[in-house]
Image (cartoon, rainbow, N blue to C red):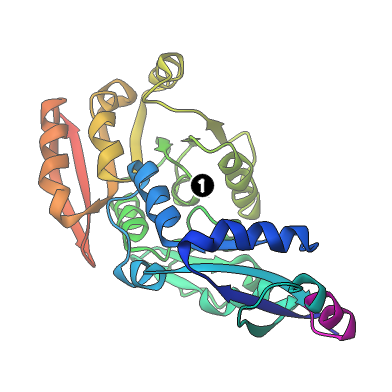
Amino acid sequence: MDSVWLEISLNVDAQELDNLSAQLIANGVPGLVVEDEEEFRAFLEENRQYWDYVDDELLEQMKGVSRVKFYVTDDADGQAQLMGYLQGIDLPYTAVPLREYDWAHSWQKYYRPLAVGERLYIVPEWERDTAAIPDGTTRLLMNPGLTFGTGSHASTQLCLEGIQEVLQPGERVLDLGCGSGILAVAALCLGASWATGVDIDPKAVDVAYENAALNDIGRDKCRFLAGNVLADKGLVEELAQEKSGLVLANIVADVIIPLAPVVPRLLSKEGTFLCSGIIDTRADEVAGALAQSGLTVIRRREKNGWVALEAKLG
């Protein structure tokens, strides 16, 4: 039988947040979850290079929030712990039951097989033996539990659709900001001869290799690296030696713009640069940066407020 836990939440004025946390720890609580609007907004500001906007619903959820959460088992032992943890704390609390299975697996019901474009059918790994693959499509197995990209976001779909249209059989592919490896692996499934993926997060390397393996793609066909092409000149030199026919970047405008001058060095003469993750209000700004770097935008794709630009040298 699955364990049942209680999520205990206490709301508190922002100025008392540290005192409450300290008292709970002193009372023996082994770990806390602290939710605070000011810290949330500071986190957004410090990491703004990774996104161009934050969903209004999320901002509303965090508005005015100062809350501490911890967890106990929903049984006699847990109740005894709870009373000890709250000793000397005169605040109301809420207790919400959570099944351990829910934490690990409930999200899976939101991730279903997904057709992208005319040739790709993304299938979650746990449905590899049950999902019916439409005729004429290529199956792309992914483990979305590994995060970093599942194919459900409009910007990723724009890239996947672009790959299906521009990829030449036997072409080399370079994915900058590879995350889960979904774009690189998709390109290999669709006929690329080799794919290199680079991401600033070292965790992405193992994730991408695992998703490649799900699709029977070994290290003789792909390479994933941790690195920053905006800061590491040696890495750029290494990638420039390969001259990829298709360079991908599904990131954000604030990264694509400084990346633009590097791209011509990475592309083969007739190669294509496909970039996405651009909100529509910044597409012209990105197109201008590409033009200044010697890249001509030849196509613009749009979906749900997101834009992907396809560009070539000259």
Q: Residues within 10 Å of mark 1 (few under 14, many from 20)?
A: many
Q: Amino acid at mark 1?
A: Gly
| Numbered marks: total | 1
Work out whether residue 219 or residue 232 is closer to the camera in this orientation and state it: 232
Instruction: Name the residue at 32% across, 57% down.
Output: 155
Query: Is residue 129 shown to the viewer in this render?
Result: no
Instruction: Name the residue at 67% across, 77% down.
Output: 7
Q: Quadrant of the C terminus?
A: top left
Q: Is residue 107 left or right of residue 299?
A: right
Query: Is residue 219 shown to the viewer in this render?
Result: yes
Residue 308, percent across and down?
23, 51
Q: Quick check: is 77 in the magenta stretch?
A: yes
Q: Is residue 26 left or right of residue 167?
A: right
Give the vertical position of 73 relative to 268 (above or below): below
Q: Residue furthest right?
A: 77
The quadrant in which residue 100 appears is bottom right
Instruction: Name the residue at 65% across, 49% down.
Output: 210
Residue 171, percent across and down?
40, 36
Residue behind mark 1: 181
Give the vertical position of 186 relative to 122 (above or below): above
Q: Is residue 51 left or right of residue 66?
A: left
Q: What kind of element bears circle 1?
A: loop
Residue 134, percent across and down?
47, 75
Q: Quadrant of the N terminus?
A: bottom right
Q: Quick check: is 267 in the magenta stretch?
A: no
Majority SS type along the magenta span: helix
Work out whether residue 127 or residue 225 is closer to the camera in this orientation and state it: 225
What range is drawn magenta here? 73-82
Instruction: Name the residue at 25% across, 24% down.
Output: 264
Give the vertical position of 186 relative to 142 (above or below): above
The quadrant in which residue 55 appears is bottom left
Q: Is residue 97 left or right of residue 232?
A: right
